[in-house]
Amino acid sequence: MRPKDAFTDEQIARFRAIEKMRAARGESRLREFFDECIKGLDPNNETAALVIEEPVRVAQARRLFELGVGTEFGTFEKYLATIPDIPTKLLEDDPNFPLLVLVDPRQGLTKLCALGDVFIDRYVGINFYDKQERGKGPYWIRIQNGEKYKGLSVDEWKEKVEYNEIGLTVFEGVCTHLQWPNIIKNHEVSDGHAMDLPGSYEGKGITPHLVMREDLKVYLGRASNLLRGEKFGQATKHAF
């Protein structure tokens, strides 16, 4: 039995409705909050109130913090205070860009990859990508994970990309992986999937990607824009 000061049945039902909706889109990240509700979380608690009002913002920030992002702030509440509100234009579901992603580049690429068990190929330009993101704070994007352009080379994608989308960057791709680690699948099996990240470009016709290899580990690598992989697709975000 829940304590009298726990969340009401109506509030828990709301959480479960949100969870069911997000799980159908592969966005399930709220189990921690349901567990707290069942245990009897004080609704006057500041974090609990935030969960009721903005569950997606809190859930994704919580996911990053529990992985080790923002631990320099000391507590989750202090880290959450640095996370911007989700822009109104991104709140509405969009079937063309179904995933809402919190990107926090402040940690640097090497740490983000380490927290997500992403191995970095030796030729990937870490300093180059860090320099591109230097000084940026956390932000929100809506993306498609590359399924839309699966099987195309990056050069072919450039001919087909639509006016309202641009390629994901390395940081955005890694943060997507941190939220949904099951998106990247072994590219050598039938349902495999790897993400090209054409928003980051090192020059000389080279584009980075996230791929799971034969050892079932995820790697941040790179390849020629001319290469076409059956399981590779170019991940993009909504450009406003």
Image: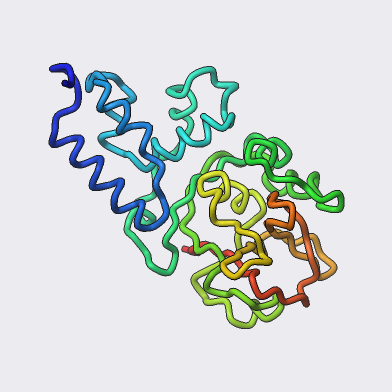
> Residue at position x 45%, y 40% from top?
60
- Of 74 and 240, nearer the camera is 74
Determine whether 94 is above or below 217 in the image.
below
Residue 9 x, y percent position in the rendering: 14, 33
- Of 13 and 209, nearer the camera is 13
Left or right: residue 170 versus residue 2 is right
Q: Quadrant of residue 147?
A: bottom right
Q: Quadrant of residue 92?
A: bottom left
**How many dots with numbers?**
0
Residue 163 x, y percent position in the rendering: 52, 75
Colouring mode (rainbow / by chain / secondary structure / one colour): rainbow
Left or right: residue 165 versus residue 2 is right
- Of 89 and 33, nearer the camera is 33
Left or right: residue 171 versus residue 36 is right
Determine whether 79 is above or below 158 in the image.
above
- Of 228 and 172, nearer the camera is 228
Whether residue 33 is visible: yes
Whether residue 154 is visible: no
Screen quadrant of the N terminus:
top left
Determine whether 191 is above or below 85 in the image.
below
Residue 239 x, y percent position in the rendering: 50, 64
Left or right: residue 75 versus residue 25 is right
Q: Quadrant of residue 235?
A: bottom right
Determine whether 175 is above or below 115 in the image.
below
> Residue at position x 69%, y 45% from top?
118
Residue 57 x, y percent position in the rendering: 39, 40
> Residue at position x 19%, y 27% from top?
7
